[in-house]
Amino acid sequence: MTVPIIHYSIPPLFIIRLSQEEILRIARRFRVPAVAVESADAGDDLTDYVRVIDLGLTSGDLADTLRPLLSIAQTETYLGALIRMQSADESLARVVDAEGRTVGMLTPDRLRDPLFRGTR
C-alpha cells in the first residue's frame, strides 16, 4: 500500500513581510530549521523559503537569504520526494495539489523517518 505524501507533510506556515528577528523568533518557537515565505509579487502562494542558519549568519537583506521553494505533487511517493529534495539540496519543499495550491510542507527529516522506523 502506498501512503500519500501529504501524510508526511506539515501544515504550511505563511510568513509575510516579517523582519529577520521576527522570523527567527517564530523558527525558535516552532523549532523549525527553515521557514517558507510568501513573495510579495506571487500573490497568495509560497514561492521561497529561508534557512534559519542563513538568517543567523547574515546581516544583510532578507532577500539575499531566500531560496526557491521546491514544489512536489501530492501524488509523489515519499521516497521520490526525498530523492528530489536531496538531489536539489533543499531543506524545505511544498506539497501541491492538482491545481498547484500549497497543501503542506515537507522536510527531509520527515521523509527519512519511515526508512528508519523500528531500527532503534
Image (cartoon, rainbow, N blue to C red):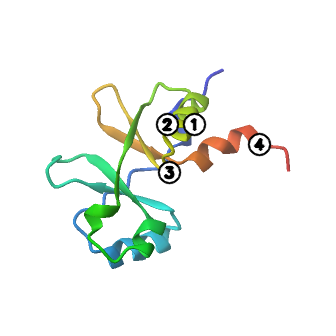
Return the x and y of residue 14 as percentages of the image width and height.
31, 57
Observer-side mark, 3 or 4, equals: 3
Check contact, mark 1 vs mark 2: CB within 8 A.
no
Q: Nearer the viewer, mark 2 or mark 4?
A: 4
- The tag on residue 82 is 1
Question: Do the numbered discs 4 and 1 sit on residues whose CB atoms are within 8 Å?
Answer: no
Distance (Cα) linking label 2 and label 4: 19 Å
Q: Earlier in the sequence, mark 4 or mark 1?
A: 1
Kindly report which numbered mark, 1 or 2, lies closer to the viewer in this rendering: 1
Q: Residue at x 54, y 36 (%)?
A: 87
User: Which residue is located at x 38 percent, y 73 percent?
Assistant: 58
The residue type indicated by label 2 comes to Ile
Label 3 and label 2: CA atoms lie apart by 17 Å
Tell me where residue 64 sits by quadrant: bottom left
Sequence-wise first label, 3 or 4: 3
Distance from Cα at disc 3 to Cα at disc 4: 19 Å
Q: Nearer the viewer, residue 67 or 9?
A: 67
Residue 116, numbered circle: 4
Q: Amino acid at mark 4?
A: Phe
Earlier in the chain: of badge 2 and badge 4, it is: 2
Q: Where does label 2 land, which residue?
A: 6
Which quadrant of the view contains residue 77? top right
Give residue 86's position: percent from left, percent from top: 56, 40
Q: Amino acid at mark 1?
A: Leu
Up-down: is 1 above or below 50? above
Q: Which residue is mark 3?
A: 91
**Residue type indicated by callout 3:** Ser
Asked if residue 58 lies left or right of residue 116, the reply is left
* Residue ID at (26%, 70%): 61
